[in-house]
Amino acid sequence: MSDESKEYQLRIVTPERVFYEGPVDMVEFNTTEGQIGVLPGHIPMTVIVAPGILTITEEDGVKTAALHAGFAEILPDRITILAEIIEWPDEIDKDRAEAALQRARERLENRDTQTDLARAETALQRSIARIEALK
Amino acid sequence: MASMRDIKRRRSSIQSTQQITKAMKLVSTVKLQRARAGAERTKSYFNCMYDTMNSILKRVGAVEHKYLNSGTAGKKAVILISSNRGLAGGYNNNVAKLITRHETWKKEELLIYAIGNKGREILSRAGYEIKEELPEVMEAPAYADAMFLTERLLQAYEAGEINEIWLAYTAFKNTVSHIPMLIKLLPVDRPEAVDLDGDGKPDQVIEGGAPMNFEPGDEEALDLIIPKYVASLIYGGLVEALASENGARMQAMDNATNNAAELIDDLELLYNRARQGSITQELTEIIAGANAIQ
């Protein structure tokens, strides 16, 4: 597989733009089933993205981004992530993310029958992912 | 024959209309360029989504799923994408005709989700039930808008209020060609299952030498992916409609400007003729007067 490791293509597309395109060594992100790391030669698989950090290991360094929603198609020679929401760290508003984290925590602590739990939890995960990506 | 003053007044009024249509044409040209770039950027997302969706559907075969099998009762939801402003030629009428002139649909079985004011006006005048109106979306379509609408539609779909979801929009082929389209979003049409070995079961779709795996399982994956698929179709419809709207307006304003130029030319001729007529008449009067004195 040594020849494949040189040319593992990552393509991240969002509805508004092509977010990333290029050869990578490894991609790590969260899925609904847990965290995964994808190396060249992976078996074909389609996974659903859960909010978290996306780590792209390139030949000369590591890039991170906050990936919130979408799904990924993994093939032995390439990986395509269809991301509904994804941000580079410098696109994140830190104060806003912290305020959102605070709000989501409060909503989960003071929950009642009216609270939309799934929504509050997603908001919590998103704001955590954003703050993590900034570090 | 109209007097010289009347012709002059009419001509200057047409001239100022022409200035407005010319300015509007320039504005929509710029907007069209921006909208077209947006539509092209969305294409790659949409194509990826479509391919993935098809490969999944081929693989799952004859599974029972709420998004794949239509319920029995319920109305049809139709999302109509039109513009908020007029002066775009036949743009709004053409897309509304898909619904008003549909061969089998009856007024009573439709619920209209209207994006854009003009389409809503046409349909509510024709007596259709407008379930929701979202005019502000057309100002700057965002993916979040499509997600929001998808959520609302899927809630109604799962509650059994509606059993089909359709999208009426204007596809953007190129600057001069825009085609009104009506497509079915839900239930998803299943592509024909491939059965080459003839064992009565659909074959696995082989991609890159190995079958595709799903994590979580096929059905859960469908639960999660189909809403994203619907949202991406709606978003694609929105951005293409925006490009078409500006293309249609550009064409309409171009025609208006040309027609105004034609009218001005005609009036110019009339005016000159009237002027010459009045000069001739004056001369005849002077000569006649001079002859009378002698």
Image (cartoon, grey):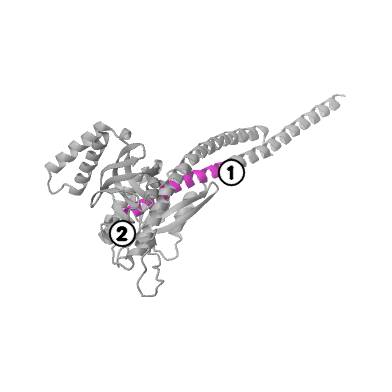
Question: In screen coordinates, is A110 left or right of B18?
Answer: left
Residue B42 is situated, as x and y percent measured from the top left of the image, at 42, 46
Q: In the image, what residue occupies the spot 56% across and 36% down?
A: B22
First to last magenta residue range: B227-253
Q: In the image, what residue occupies the spot 65% across and 35% down?
A: B7
Q: Which of B39/B76 is in front?
A: B39
Q: Are both tags, 1 and 2, on one chain? A: yes
Q: Amino acid at mark 2?
A: Asn
Q: Which of A36/B69 is in front?
A: A36
Chain of the residue displaying label 2:
B
Q: Amino acid at mark 1?
A: Asn
Marks 1 and 2, how far apart in space?
55 Å
Q: Which residue is mark 2?
A: B213
Question: What kind of secondary structure does the magenta stretch mostly adopt?
Answer: helix
Q: Residues within 10 Å of mark 1 (few under 14, many from 20)?
A: some
Mark count: 2
Quadrant holding the N terminus of chain B: top right
Residue A46 is situated, as x and y percent measured from the top left of the image, at 32, 55
Q: Which residue is mark 1?
A: B255
Q: In the image, what residue occupies the spot 55% across and 48% down?
A: B176
Question: In screen coordinates, is B180 left or right of A42?
Answer: right
